[in-house]
Image (cartoon, rainbow, N blue to C red):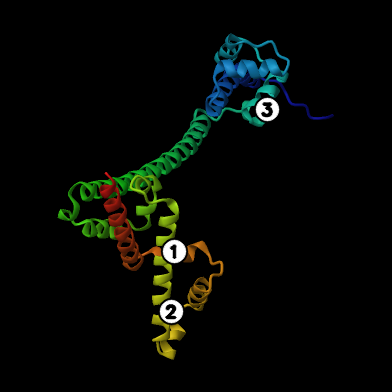
Amino acid sequence: MENQRQSTPANAEAAESVAARLPSVLAMRLKGARVASGMSQQAVAEAMVERGFKWRQSTVAKSESGDRPVLFSEVAALSAIYRKDLDYFRHSGGNLDELIDALERQLSDTRRDYQALLYQVQASRSEIVMFECVTELAQAIRQYRDTGDEFDLDVALRDAFHRHGYMCFSMPSLYEAVGIDQSDIENIDSWALRKVASNERRRHRSLSEEELMEESGMLLNSVAQFLDGEQVDPGFIASLREGDEWASFAWMALGGLLKKRIQVESEGE
């Protein structure tokens, strides 16, 4: 005789308890999944309509509160919308699963917002420095134009170039206002770069064999290629502009040109 599982009052009571809890478990999981996804009830209703269900915002609300039965086909559609496995809606994990989902999403969103904000701050900081530099130069040029040699333009240019470097050439319209066009600025930059590169090569030639062994062969090659008019890496050009040497050549050349143009402008008035 086969053993059969006997139905007892205790088993029946347990089954009834589980069945009674299923609607509330499902309702809780539906709400938790929606909150974690960041969707509104209206957005969920529209997504369900797209899948052929006659849902409204009130349908979502009643499903999440347990005030209406939810069909299996509806749960399957919602699992696709929320990107959750069907098992997620069958078992109660308490509020912890929903909390973790929401926290992970919030953390991801906050990190993204922080990176975007950090980029904006860095961009704004660079703009502020650039405008400070250009404003400083513009004020110096105007003061020299208005007072002549009573104002030491060389000191102002020297301080600006040693503090801001190549950024001093970042706004061509500043120099165009006093008759210096972009080609003049490019010529000054090119001349200053060649002076720095020539000094670098001269320094290499004065090094001992042991000192040369410690130098970067790539740097030596780049110096030679640049002075021979060959194409070189932009990073090498940027390295030549770093430091006080390029700044000194650049501000002296610019200062001489500025004085000539301002003098010609004054004589023409």
Q: Earlier in the sequence, mark 1 or mark 3?
A: 3
Quarter occupied by the C terminus: top left
What residue sits 44% from the left and 82% below the top? Answer: 214
Q: How far apart are marks 2 and 3 (CA)?
A: 67 Å
Image coordinates of residue 37 in percent, x first then y, are: 56, 28
Q: Distance between the residues labelled 1 and 3?
A: 62 Å
Q: Residue furthest left?
A: 150
The label nearer to you, 1 versus 3, is 1
Q: Is residue 141 left or right of residue 111?
A: left
**Badge 1, how many Cα within 10 Å: few under 14, some, many 20+?**
some
Work out whether residue 189 or residue 53 is closer to the camera in this orientation and state it: 189
Q: What residue type is labelled 1?
A: Ser
What residue sits 39% from the left and 81% below the top? Answer: 203
Q: Name the residue under label 2.
A: 201
**Badge 3, how many Cα within 10 Å: few under 14, some, many 20+?**
few
Looking at the image, do the residues carrying marks 2 and 3 touch, with CB atoms under 8 Å apart? Answer: no
Q: Name the residue under label 1.
A: 190
Q: What residue type is labelled 3?
A: Ala
Which image quarter: residue 52? top right
Q: In this view, does 140 lie above or below 162?
A: above
User: For the residue labelled by badge 2, is the local secondary structure a helix, a strand or a loop?
Assistant: helix
Q: Which of marks 2 and 3 is nearer the N terminus?
A: 3
User: For the residue labelled by badge 3, is the local secondary structure a helix, a strand or a loop?
Assistant: helix
Q: Name the residue under label 3.
A: 80
Q: Earlier in the sequence, mark 2 or mark 1?
A: 1
Q: In this view, does 123 lie to the left or right of 78?
A: left
Q: Is residue 140 above or below residue 20?
A: below
Looking at the image, do the residues carrying marks 2 and 1 touch, with CB atoms under 8 Å apart? Answer: no
Q: Can residue 16 be seen in this view?
A: no
